[in-house]
Amino acid sequence: MPSLKDLKNRIESVKSTRKITKAMQMVAAAKLRRAQEAAEDSRPYTKRFNAVMAGLAASVGGSDSAPKLLRGTGSDQVHLLVVMTAERGLCGGFNSNIAKLARQKAAELKAAGKTVKVLTVGKKGRDALKRDLGSDFVGHVDLSDVKRIGYANAQAIAKDILTRFDAGEFDVATIFFSEFVNVVTQIPTAQQIIPASFEAEEGESSGAVYDYEPGEEQILADLLPRGVATQIFSGLLENGASEQGARMSAMDNATRNAGEMIDKLTIEFNRSRQAVITNELIEIISGAEAL
Amino acid sequence: MAQTMQFDLVSPERALASLQASAVQIPGAEGDMTAMPQHAPTITTLRPGVLKVESPEGNSEYLVTGGFAEIAGDSLSVLAERAIPMAEMTRDQMNALIEEAREMYKTAKEEDQPHGLVEDAAKLLADMEALGTHMSL
């Protein structure tokens, strides 16, 4: 049976924990709003970009002269998994869900006899995958000192990936990120970026025949690397919103748990305080009776 | 009343403009061109330059650095890699952009990258410098 003083101390410490988780929840809520706005701002660009690319890819894609980024290298032996996670923890299952999906995919590919290479973006994913896939790591991108994800960050990652592709280091690249649905739901997603696949939105194609200036293939060759950057950028933004959403609900749960714990401890504290008082009374009464 | 078309300018980070325009001058990769309503459907890539928008409400200018434009008769979308309203542009920013282009050219040359990246970077640098002088800030 813990003493009254011990109980008091525990209640105090849980109370300060609750204060911290509450503050983190509120910070995450504020950041979430910003992250969500950023993700929404980028959507028109991504949508139009994909629509144009889908049109272009459809008209050029079949030919042999199509760029490698679209056509692929003709084999699918070596896979590059780009695992994008957060730089910080304390956000529920966010990081581990992405890592789990990546691990699963890697196991599948390995079972099929493919070679797997892993590029991690974000410290937490790296830590989570180190044990299982540590020997397959080819690189790591650190975004811990980036306050606000910009297109330039995505471009840098895309450049790294494209350089590796040009050097023939891999045939297929897939990015892993968490798609933001709402605060309580984030879906870990795998998306293939090389060779590129573009899906036109329903009813988007106007059916108009475009003039291309310069030629179709040149435009395609110019835009495909940008497409990689765009997809990474939207993945990063989705991730940003998901991270804050996951942290917000995780911290909300933690705050509630702390509250319950405080209630329980307070009841225990009151009971033992009463027990002490009753004890003292009994002692006094029996002392008086003895006289 | 002058005819107008829907004009959208978006960059990956935000949508900058969405308005009715009567004419838009685009810095295309193969030369400037002006798109007006009922222009033939065209897709062109952009070089760094100034995008001039004429609309019934007044004219506006944006600095764009690469990307592409999609012209479709009654609408025009410009997807710029980076777009900055001319009014917010300062000499320092311009210098930073030129410096960035110069840096890119240097690394491209040193690493001797394939696919004519060196020429691309050189062209980008030249475009940026020309733009800087043109703006005469």
Image (cartoon, coloured by chain):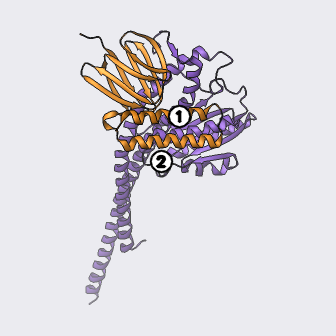
- Same subunit, labels 1 and 2: the answer reads yes
Q: Would residue A30 be found to the left or right of residue B42 on screen?
A: left
Relative depth, front residue between A196 and A109:
A196
Residue A138 placement, left or right of B134: right
Q: Nearer the viewer, mark 1 or mark 2?
A: 1
Q: Secondary structure at mark 1?
A: helix
Q: Quadrant of residue B1?
A: top left
Residue type of the residue flagged with mark 1: Ala
For the N terminus of chain A, the quadrant is bottom left
Estimate the x, y position of residue A265 in percent, counting from the top left: 37, 63
> Percent from the top left, x then y, of residue A114?
73, 35
- Residue A108 visible here: no
Query: Which residue sits at x=51%, y=48%?
Result: A143
To which residue does mark 1 refer? A229
Q: Which chain is orange?
A: B
Q: Which residue is mark 2?
A: A92
- Who's the residue at 34% across and 49% down the image? A26
Tell me the purple chain.
Answer: A
